Amino acid sequence: MHFYKYHGLGNDFVLVDTRRQELPVAGEDLSALGRLVCDRHFGIGADGLVLLRPVDGADIQMQIINSDGSEPEMCGNGIRCAAKYLYEHGGLRQDEMRIATLAGIMRPRLIRQNGRVQAVRVDMGEPRLERTDIPMTGPPGRVVDEPLALNGGSFRVTAVSMGNPHCLIFTAHVDRVPLTELGPKLENHPAFPRKTNVEFIEVLNRGEVRMRVWERGAGPTLACGTGACAAAVGGALNGLTERTVKVHLPGGTLDIQWAEDNHVYMTGPAAEVFAGEYTGRPV
Ligand SMILES: N[C@@H](CCC[C@H](N)C(=O)O)C(=O)O
């Protein structure tokens, strides 16, 4: 299987263009393929597998499989990588694209300099704030700075869906958070019937935050695009930040704007690392 390896701020992906080859999976067992290629010891190694497919009504479809084999609705860093690949290798020589995902059609726009893609700005659509849309259990309404019981204590959480669920916790010292202990407990908390991504956020000032993320189906990652968008929305909902913020992640910085049209715009880099042939065991 021919693949490309990309990353967005260290959130890394194996990218496969299914328009150019058949996948080596019996009955399209994408969950098993995702687990195999993402494995950092026995596979190529990645946080996720990004599959590009032909589709009606958009330029391309992006499907993503987490490293645990689950299929999320959307991936912000992955879509910037997909857009860069499509322009540089995938025959889509246009600056604006429409990419279909399980969360709807996303619209990346390339920012180019001397013909090279420097960054990608993506219209990530509207955030979903109703509890049932996260989804989260409990009475109807938004989940903003609400207590969530865990381990005999409680956290104040804000919940935002960017097509995929995010549980945001604002904290004074993000470096002191025991991410690998709390992350899986919150990811699998019964309040989130489809599990959740978990973001710990420290507000530096009204235009900048620092964030660490525990991703649903992938664990701790160096960056999360949808998570950064959710953090900007959550910061504004709590009155802690403006609607335009820089989100500093372990892998680098994303610029996020929750615009007046209610759409969230994410700007950040995407990088190609290498290409290769996966010769591992077919599923
Ligand atoms: N890293 C991604 C999010 C990938 C999906 C996530 N793990 C989930 O299950 O929702 C991003 O950059 O948005």
Image (tube, rainbow, N blue to C red):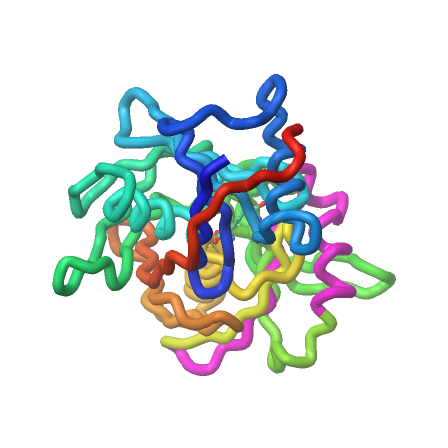
Q: Which residue sits furthest right?
A: 152
Tell me what residue is drawn at x 43 percent, y 50 percent.
275
Image coordinates of residue 174 in percent, x first then y, are 61, 77
Magenta region includes residue 187: yes
Which one is nearer the viewer's eye here, 4 or 164? 4
Magenta region includes residue 5: no
Residue 227 lies, with reference to residue 38, above or below; the image says below
Residue 80 lies, with reference to residue 235, above or below; the image says above
Tell me what residue is drawn at x 66 percent, y 64 percent.
156
Which one is nearer the viewer's eye here, 90 or 101? 90
Quick check: 89 left or right of 201? Answer: left
Residue 149 lies, with reference to residue 58, above or below; the image says below
Residue 247 shows in the view: yes
How many marks the image carries: the answer is 0
Tell me what residue is drawn at x 37 percent, y 31 percent.
61
Quadrant into which the C terminus falls: top right
Quick check: 229 left or right of 216? Answer: left
Quarter where residue 25 is shown: top right
Quick check: 283 left or right of 57? Answer: right
Quarter where residue 6 is shown: bottom left
Which one is nearer the viewer's eye here, 46 or 133? 46
Tell me what residue is drawn at x 31 percent, y 55 percent.
265
The boundaries of the magenta stretch are 179-206
Image coordinates of residue 252 in percent, x first then y, are 44, 72
Residue 218 lies, with reference to residue 193, above or below; the image says below
Image coordinates of residue 7 in percent, x first then y, are 45, 58
Quick check: 71 left or right of 243? Answer: right
Q: Which residue sits furthest top?
A: 27
Image coordinates of residue 132 in percent, x first then y, are 57, 36
Residue 103 shows in the view: no
